[in-house]
Amino acid sequence: MRHLAALGALCFLATTSLVSAQLQVSVQTERNDFLLYERVDLHITITNVGESDLVLNNDEGHPWLSFLVTRHNRLPVRQERRASFKPVNLKAGETKTLKVDLTPLYSFREEGQYNAAAVINLPGAGDLLSDSVPFTVLRGRQIWAQTRPVDGSQRVYSLIRFSPQPDKTNLYLRVEDPSANLILANLSLGEVVAYIEPDVYFDPQGNLHVLQPIAMSTYLYSRADLDGKVVHQGIFKTFQDIPPRLAKLDDGNVIVRGGLEENPNTPRETLSQGQQKASAQADQVPQPSVAQPVASPEPPVAQPEAPAAQPTATSPSSP
């Protein structure tokens, strides 16, 4: 038995060496932190370091691309659904980078630290495992939620503050159907100023209207449909000292009152630029005795053939 085990280990090492002599593979994510149920894009870079052209495909009944996802305690994350990918042709010396959304494939149902690696199967040669890349899944802070009936089910709409980067906070819209165990939408509407809550209204058609502060005297208006798809966005500026606000008419329709809509072709300052301008102005004027608070502020895609519905474990509580 010991001889058989040693022979198996030697065969594994031999096949691994054979694949690594022909391929190099590395993975990375766009950032370190992701909101729970947000898409986690893994970028897989594959280089043919051999002297002959290669075709990566599923002809031998094995997926040429798969993944190893683990928790911080090295326990594997259960795969929700399998996916197959289109063949990739690599000429000698050629490098290609693919982008795969891991969220529909795995159960990121809990916040915590994860690691992901790519596994490349080269027909007739064996598997090659890349180094793993760490990332963290966080819940964010829910600031608003409402449950509404849609097509016979109760959908939960919620707004979540989340910082994908240390110096940046975004407002996310999530739409989920707990009865179907589905996340219909989980997307960023854009940057949001701290300490100021957005205006939120539904219209009679079930569209969601959100007005959020994104910079000094600047607001982002978003309208999303029943499924959480954003169908319109616009920038509004404070005009004649009157900031824009959402208002509901007698018939239930929603409008933006006050302010002035910005021409979409006009460049606007970012939140960070607005902060820098405020800091520069503050340096030029006498400082008050009491500090006043200041508002803080692609490569080709490899798409799985499986549906991209996202699982959810629990639904946010309704207000």
Image (cartoon, grey):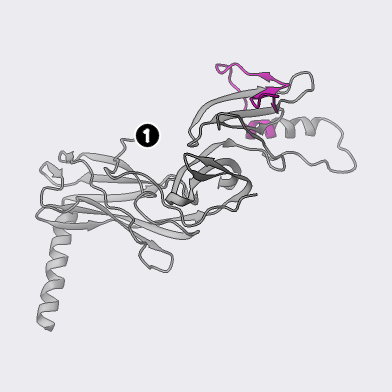
Q: Is residue 75 left or right of residue 260?
A: left
User: Which residue corresponds to the image point at 19% horizontal and 58% vertical from the top-left?
Assistant: 127
Extreme residue in the right direction: 289
Residue type at the position of mark 1: Glu
Residue highlighted by disc 1? 298
Q: Is residue 10 above or below residue 167?
A: below
Tally the marks.
1
Q: Quadrant of the N terminus?
A: bottom left
Q: Secondary structure at mark 1?
A: loop
Q: Which residues are magenta?
A: 247-276
Extreme residue in the bottom direction: 1
Q: Is residue 204 above or below residue 295?
A: above
Q: Is residue 302 left or right of residue 28?
A: left
User: Which residue corresponds to the image point at 64% horizontal and 25% vertical from the top-left?
Assistant: 253
Q: Is residue 271 above or below residue 103?
A: above
Extreme residue in the front direction: 152
- Is residue 257 covered in magenta? yes
Q: Position of residue 298 (x, y in %)?
A: 37, 34
Q: Position of residue 38 (x, y in %)?
A: 46, 46
User: Which residue corresponds to the image point at 16% horizontal and 66% vertical from the top-left?
Assistant: 13
Frontmost residue, 118 versus 315: 315
- Is residue 263 covered in magenta? yes
